[in-house]
Image (cartoon, helix red, strand yellow):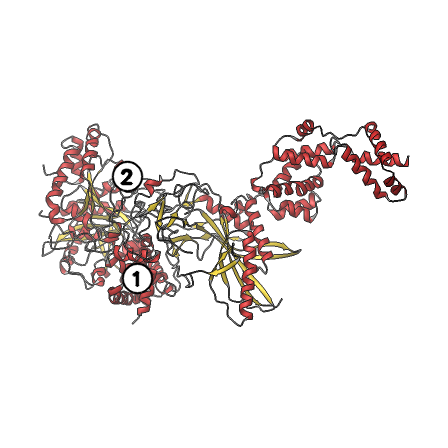
């Protein structure tokens, strides 16, 4: 590859406070247009903003979880521009003194560990939404106006779409862990603008970058980076220049397009908002926020490896989502075989979630169900295969595994007498595999085990069947 | 009884004694308004039906001795303070049909104290001006001389009090907009310390400078109204926590030994001879009352006007960018797209002076100019505040003329700069966030009122009210407008 | 001229104003006022901190407790044009 792709991200995360940033309207997704709005968030004459105390706390915690320095002194500024989704024609944001600076996130992409630096994190208010299907024109809905956001700005340290995706996954997982955002990209609570430039490999000068907007999912982020890097490289190879511009990612078409009328750089005319007073945090307060943080993903992973003796890979998968880790740890309270539990969580729970299209954060199932199923297997009541099937049904129906086993008569058959009878019949009816086995092909045994499972509808105890078959054949 | 001639204090006493009822009082003021408005033209919108209804409710309460410290008293409100269900226009075409669904906090407070809203007063559009000639609707005339301006931007409020249209009025002051019209109209105008009165519901002009305050006939009246409207408001992040806000205590305290500084910069060229003579008299009065009056200095005085116009225009341009024809107010009839909607609406909806300040504000904030203008002005603001702090280390109060000259003739000041210069004595006070009051202290040779300004340290309203009240007692009665 | 005609146009655009015949007047106004501001350069402010807030107030917060939003019909009662509870603007193409 002659060229290197350079990516920087601006990630907007909606904070999951109860109310909006400057007024007491509910901070809720959806709802009929303009039903979560008031004179303050719709910018009526004479109204004034008052800062939500939780916004400062959540922003500081987000910064701490991302290894940032938390500013003792920060302030709010007005960023002026005109757009119908911005009722005051200025957005209250933070310009030169943001609440967090100089952090980083560690990602592991294709086996390589890398630090992605975070330049800053600042607090700002969200704008409303434009709905374009009105008969008289575009419709404006201010429900989202005033929802509190933090904007996480990275240095241009990312070098591929894979790294970008890993970075976003890490941000999402971290925000979930500290419970400051539900990070649902499909609801817009995590959005991202992507800055891409390319340069000859080995160069340390940054190429001209383009900013991409309307990147609404992690897969869009991935695809848009791949597309844009290719587009820029092709331009350069053709002897043309990359123009610095804002481009819109069209997910359906899989392309970026120059945005109309956004070519000129905005003059935002930032100045300190005179209606709001500075945010001053003492070192003690910041320490207090740090102490109140729950165990973060990387610390949890380390603990799983050291204390629970799980592998790096397993620990990584389990801690990738707070909801999976919580499920696992909840289960571990009633079960003392972490490796076994980990296998079931990774192998079965995650598969079921994927198949059913359920996101970990929306999962409603009680880990006790999995523990019950595991114990049934450990106690020999059912075999492993049956146990896992029973768990899956239990997950979907919410019935207890024991109930399912009873109702469907799935108890493992371990009665040697009953099994011997059946084995005798099968061995007698299948001379060829017997001959193969006696000739030294030990694998021929699986044929008989398989036949037994079929005959017992999967309920035979495989270990005992194995022993009895060998006994019968060697006989 | 000509109740419109009574002071607020006298009115309250009569109400208490049952010598007049809220309904009678209200009716008297309504009659008075009808009689003088054709000459003064101070009011944008009257609310007589509502007022009469409210007065009836207050009749019963006042009889029982209930209802708050302003129970049954009619008042007038500058038309830039939001009144729920009643038009609030800021004397601008762009808000000519705006009916807020909420009250300004001061309106809620006055309602709580039993006051009765009679009307919304005319003003310079969006409070930008010094003569009320910038109103999009009409000119208001000075009750002392109908050919002269009442001052601005609270010209309607000041004129209405001078004309006896209400027991008191509320105005707003960003660079002198209460004090200057008070001086021009021969009434008392008080601008409290920044943060003492909530700005919630006051249509913002310059957020770090705006304050609401009373226009009244006497200093004691001013103290009563201030007590009703002051206080912390959790809806205003810039409002101050206060233990008490009863400003009528200690009005009669002796002022022997009080130290008053008179900055020499207020007496340079530009000050009219009449005003100087009146101020000199006032100083003599203070000395006879036992005050120590000395010359002092405000070295950054000459820079305050520039700092003021930079800061206020910058904040104003930002505060006024929300007026775009989308959510409320005037909307142009013809436009091609969203950008054109904004441009057409704002061009048609805003007056000349407002447009000038919007342009100026965007210029001083725009990239490349921010440091030279806005940042510079903020630094000068620090120096001005320091100058005042220095004076207050040695003095309890500052005394100065409120304006360089008396009310000028309508149409006389066409050049914007000349108009801006009329605020030169009041503007530094807003920059420093200090409390100040204008008190009539003499009449000019053309029989126009002259105002004296008393300035105090932050949160020293009681001191300036006390000093003002004692002076007022010594001065004696001040002539009323002959309407 | 300190303020060029182009500058005036740029500022007018930022202000969302159409100046038309007033452009020359506005240009002169800006010039006059800005010349007046030159006076501030007489003051040495190199070591002076800017005052953004005249009050010594910091950390003013509101509790994160929901209060009912305003009824939509009342909230939008001043809207020059609305449909389905939304404010209407000329169609925007993004």
Between B346 and B251, the one lying in front of the other is B346
Image position of B245 (left or right of B445) = right
- The quarter of the displayed image where residue B342 is located: bottom left
Residue at screen point 53% across, 72% down: A239
Disc 1 chain ID: B
Percent across and percent down for residue B286 are 18, 50
Residue pointed to by mark 2:
B109
Could you tell me how far apart the alpha carbons at marks 1 and 2 are, in whole angstroms? 36 Å
Percent across and percent down for residue B8 are 18, 40
Dot 2: few (<14), some (14–19), or many (≥20) neighbours within 10 Å? some
- The quarter of the displayed image where residue B387 is located: bottom left
Q: Are marks 1 and 2 on the same chain?
A: yes
Between B292 and B435, the one lying in front of the other is B435
Q: Nearer the viewer, mark 1 or mark 2?
A: 1
Q: Give the quadrant of the N terminus of chain B.
A: top left
Image position of B311 (left or right of B467) = right
The disc, 1 or 2, on the residue closer to the chain's N-terminal end is: 2
Residue C3 appears in the rendering: no
Residue pointed to by mark 1:
B360
Disc 2 chain ID: B
Count the marks.
Answer: 2
Percent across and percent down for residue B255 are 22, 46
Q: For mark 1, give the secondary structure.
A: helix
Q: Is residue A262 above or below residue A65?
A: below
């Amino acid at each position: 590859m002659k060229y290197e792709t350079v990516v920087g991200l601006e990630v907007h995360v909606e904070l999951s406070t109860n109310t909006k940033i400057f007024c007491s309207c509910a901070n809720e997704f959806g709802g009929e247009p303009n039903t979560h709005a008031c004179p303050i968030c719709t910018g009526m004459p004479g109204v004034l903003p008052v800062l939500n105390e939780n916004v400062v706390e959540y922003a500081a915690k987000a910064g701490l979880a991302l290894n940032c320095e938390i500013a003792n002194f920060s302030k709010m500024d007005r960023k002026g521009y005109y757009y119908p989704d911005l009722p005051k024609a200025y957005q209250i944001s933070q310009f030169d003194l943001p609440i967090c600076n100089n952090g980083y996130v560690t990602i592991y992409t294709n086996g390589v560990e890398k630090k992605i630096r975070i330049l800053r994190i600042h607090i700002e208010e969200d704008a409303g939404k434009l709905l374009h299907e009105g008969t008289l024109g575009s419709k404006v809905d201010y429900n989202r106006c005033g929802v509190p956001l933090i904007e996480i700005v990275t240095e241009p340290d990312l070098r591929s779409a894979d790294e970008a995706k890993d970075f976003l996954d890490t941000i999402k997982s971290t925000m979930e862990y500290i419970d400051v955002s539900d990070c649902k990209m499909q609801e817009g609570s995590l959005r991202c603008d992507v800055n891409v430039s390319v340069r000859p490999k080995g160069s340390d000068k940054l190429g001209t970058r383009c900013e991409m907007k309307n990147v609404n999912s992690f897969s869009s982020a991935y695809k848009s980076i791949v597309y844009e890097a290719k587009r820029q490289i092709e331009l350069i190879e053709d002897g043309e220049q990359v123009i610095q511009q804002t481009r819109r990612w069209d997910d359906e078409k899989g392309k970026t397009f120059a945005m109309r009328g956004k070519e000129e750089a905005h003059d935002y005319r930032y100045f300190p908002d005179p209606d709001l007073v500075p945010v001053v945090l003492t070192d003690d307060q910041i320490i207090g926020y740090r102490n109140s943080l729950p165990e973060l993903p990387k610390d949890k992973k380390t603990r799983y490896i050291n204390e629970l003796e799980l592998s790096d890979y397993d620990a990584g998968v389990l801690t990738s989502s707070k909801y999976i880790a919580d499920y696992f740890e909840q289960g571990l309270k009633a079960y003392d075989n972490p490796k076994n539990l980990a296998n079931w969580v990774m192998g079965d729970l995650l598969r079921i979630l994927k198949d059913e299209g359920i996101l970990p954060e929306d999962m409603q199932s009680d880990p006790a169900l999995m523990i019950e199923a595991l114990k049934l297997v450990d106690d020999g009541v059912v075999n492993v295969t049956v146990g896992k099937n029973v768990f899956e049904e239990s997950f979907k129906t919410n019935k207890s595994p024991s109930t399912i086993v009873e109702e469907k008569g799935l108890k493992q058959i371990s009665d040697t007498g009953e099994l011997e009878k059946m084995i005798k019949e099968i061995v007698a009816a299948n001379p060829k595999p017997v001959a193969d086995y006696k000739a030294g092909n030990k694998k021929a045994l699986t044929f008989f085990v398989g036949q037994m499972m079929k005959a017992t509808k999967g309920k035979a105890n495989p270990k005992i069947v194995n022993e009895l078959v060998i006994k019968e054949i060697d006989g | 009884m000509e109740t419109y001639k009574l002071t607020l204090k006298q009115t309250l006493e009569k109400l208490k004694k049952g010598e007049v009822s809220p309904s009678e009082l209200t009716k008297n003021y309504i009659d008075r308004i009808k009689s003088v408005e054709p000459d003064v033209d101070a009011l944008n919108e009257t609310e007589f039906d509502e007022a009469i209804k409210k007065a009836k409710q207050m009749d019963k309460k006042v009889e029982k001795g209930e209802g708050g410290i302003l129970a049954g008293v009619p008042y007038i409100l500058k038309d830039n303070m939001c009144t729920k269900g009643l038009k609030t226009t800021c004397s601008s075409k762009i808000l000519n049909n705006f009916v807020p669904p909420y009250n300004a906090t001061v309106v809620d407070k006055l309602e709580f104290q039993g006051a009765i809203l009679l009307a919304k007063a005319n003003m310079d559009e969006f409070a930008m001006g010094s003569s009320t000639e910038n109103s999009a609707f009409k000119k208001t005339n000075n009750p002392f001389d109908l050919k002269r301006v009442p001052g601005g931007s609270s010209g309607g409020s000041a004129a209405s009090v001078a004309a006896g249209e209400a027991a008191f009025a509320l105005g707003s002051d960003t660079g002198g907009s209460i004090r200057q019209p008070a001086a021009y109209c021969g009434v008392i105008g008080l601008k409290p310390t920044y943060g003492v009165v909530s700005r919630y519901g006051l249509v913002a002009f310059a957020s770090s400078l705006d304050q609401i305050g009373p226009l009244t006939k006497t200093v004691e009246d001013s103290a009563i109204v201030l007590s009703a409207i002051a206080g912390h408001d959790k809806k205003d992040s810039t409002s101050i926590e206060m233990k008490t806000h009863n400003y009528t205590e200690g009005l009669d305290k002796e002022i022997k030994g009080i130290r008053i500084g008179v900055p020499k910069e207020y007496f340079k060229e530009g000050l009219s001879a009449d005003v100087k003579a009146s101020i000199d008299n006032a100083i003599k009065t203070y000395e006879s009352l036992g005050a120590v009056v000395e010359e002092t200095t405000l070295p950054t005085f000459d820079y305050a006007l520039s700092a003021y116009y930079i800061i206020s225009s910058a904040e104003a341009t930002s505060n006024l960018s929300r007026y775009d024809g989308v959510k409320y107010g005037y909307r142009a009839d013809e436009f091609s797209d969203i950008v054109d909607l904004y441009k057409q609406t704002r061009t048609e909806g805003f007056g000349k002076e407002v447009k000038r300040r919007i342009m100026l504000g965007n210029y001083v904030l725009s990239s490349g100019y921010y440091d030279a203008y806005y940042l510079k002005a903020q630094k000068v603001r620090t120096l001005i505040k320091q100058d005042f702090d220095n004076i207050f280390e040695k003095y309890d109060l500052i005394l100065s003329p409120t304006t360089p000259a008396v009310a000028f003739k309508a149409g006389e000041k066409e050049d914007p700069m000349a108009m801006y210069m009329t605020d030169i004595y009041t503007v530094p006070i807003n920059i420093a966030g200090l409390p100040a009051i204008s008190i009539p202290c003499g009449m000019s040779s053309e029989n126009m009122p002259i105002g004296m300004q008393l300035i105090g340290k932050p949160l020293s309203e009681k001191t300036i009210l006390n000093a003002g009240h004692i002076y007022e007692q010594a001065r004696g009665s001040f002539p009323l407008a002959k309407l | 001229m300190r303020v060029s005609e182009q500058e005036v146009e740029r500022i007018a655009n930022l202000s969302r104003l159409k100046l038309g015949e007033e452009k020359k007047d506005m240009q002169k106004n800006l010039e006059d006022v800005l010349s007046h501001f030159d006076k501030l350069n007489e003051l040495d402010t190199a070591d002076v901190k800017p005052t953004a807030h005249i009050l010594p107030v910091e950390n003013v917060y509101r509790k994160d407790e929901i209060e009912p939003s305003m009824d939509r019909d009342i909230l939008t009662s001043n809207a020059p044009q609305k449909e389905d509870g939304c404010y209407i603007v000329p169609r925007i193409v993004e």
